[in-house]
Amino acid sequence: MIDLKKIPKIELHVHLDGSLNIDKISEITKEDKKVLEEKMTAGEKLSSLKDYLDKFDYAVSLLQIPDLIRKLASSLREDLIKDNVIYAEVRYAPLKHISYISMDEFIDIVYEELNKDKKLKVKLILCMMRNDSKLNNMKVINLAKKHLKKEVVGIDLAGDEDSYPTKDFKDLFDYANELKIPITIHSGESTNYKEVEAALNMHAKRIGHGIRSIDNFDLINKLKDNNILLELCPTSNVQTNSVDIYKNHPIKLFSLLGVTYSINTDNRLVSEIDLSREYKKLIDNRLVTIEGIIKSNLNAIKYSFLTEEEKVTLFKKYNDLLREM
Ligand SMILES: [Zn+2]
């Protein structure tokens, strides 16, 4: 059996505030790890996406002071490197971290910390929030434009899709598209395939989750015709109760139908997962083969929001590491 940890990995869908290291938090806050786990992890399963989203609150409260932000971002960098991730697009919602510093300062600190080791390259995706005002979300788009092709590579929409449907955000995504900001949208995770259709009408090049696409063949064809990648996060989908049990995750059907996807953790702390363990669960449940895992990583490079030139460099690096395995 191949050592899954050694596979070089690309991760396109990982939330900063959901992916901090719990030992580091315990060390900083002097809180008992068990208490932190209760507060910050999803366990086997929660009743809904909304319950899952509540698990982020404590991490957000910590990610406010520069010194803490540095320490916690570096804990994520170390975890990504341990998992043999060589490129990641890390996302977060800028307006949640403005108690003591500006949104620009936050970008500078997080970007610097995540890129401190040559083994790992990281770019940022900024999340608009579904429950936020249009004016605030506009600020996030303008921030993304300001830092585009430097620290930031794209924009996202996150939060409770049951209460705030994707169609209500069309103006914002039209604006982001005019500014040529690459778009990914969380959709079709906990609701239905129509949310994914709505996201495709809003210039999304990638879909966060999109698992409900499996319920409509016209949409499957549309995903293929429009070269859309699904950012799949199987463990997270079971915990949010979007999928009943792991072996029923539609990832295998997506493969058979020729839908392009990458494999992601979503939230390393909340979901208590890394990519090496996610790969093992997928293989143990006969949902994906090793070849499928490598292919999902190559897809992740192809559909990353890097420039074409950067993609070629990353592909060469990936290929070299694969040969060295
Ligand atoms: Zn997500």
Image: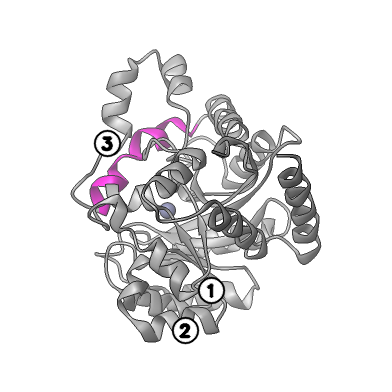
**How far across and down, in percent of the image, does residue 88 sit?**
61, 48
Residue under label 2:
222
Name which residue type carries label 2: Lys
Q: Residue at x 54, y 58 (%)?
A: 292
Please state, as top left, top right, bottom left or bottom right, where the C terminus lies in the image. Answer: top right
Answer above or below: position of 227 versus 93. below
- Magenta stretch bounds: 49-64
Position of 110 with respect to 18 (left or right) is right
Which numbered dot is residue 43? 3
Answer above or below: position of 41 versus 161. above
**How far across and down, in percent of the image, does residue 129 sit?**
40, 58
Position of 144 with respect to 131 (left or right) is right
Whichever of labels 2 and 3 marks the residue nearer the N terminus, that label is 3
Residue labelled 2 has its Cβ within 8 Å of some atom of ligand 1: no
Give the main secondary structure of the magenta stretch.
helix
**How far across and down, in percent of the image, does residue 169 sit?**
41, 73
**How far across and down, in percent of the image, does residue 50 sit?**
25, 52
Q: Residue at x 18, y 49 (%)?
A: 47
Assign a secondary structure to mark 2: helix
Residue closest to the eye, 26 or 13: 13
Q: Residue at x 40, y 56 (%)?
A: 287
Residue under label 1:
228
Q: Residue furthest left?
A: 47
Assign a secondary structure to mark 1: loop
Q: Residue at x 44, y 30 (%)?
A: 62
> Is residue 15 visible to us here?
yes
Answer above or below: position of 183 versus 22. below
Answer above or below: position of 31 versus 243. above
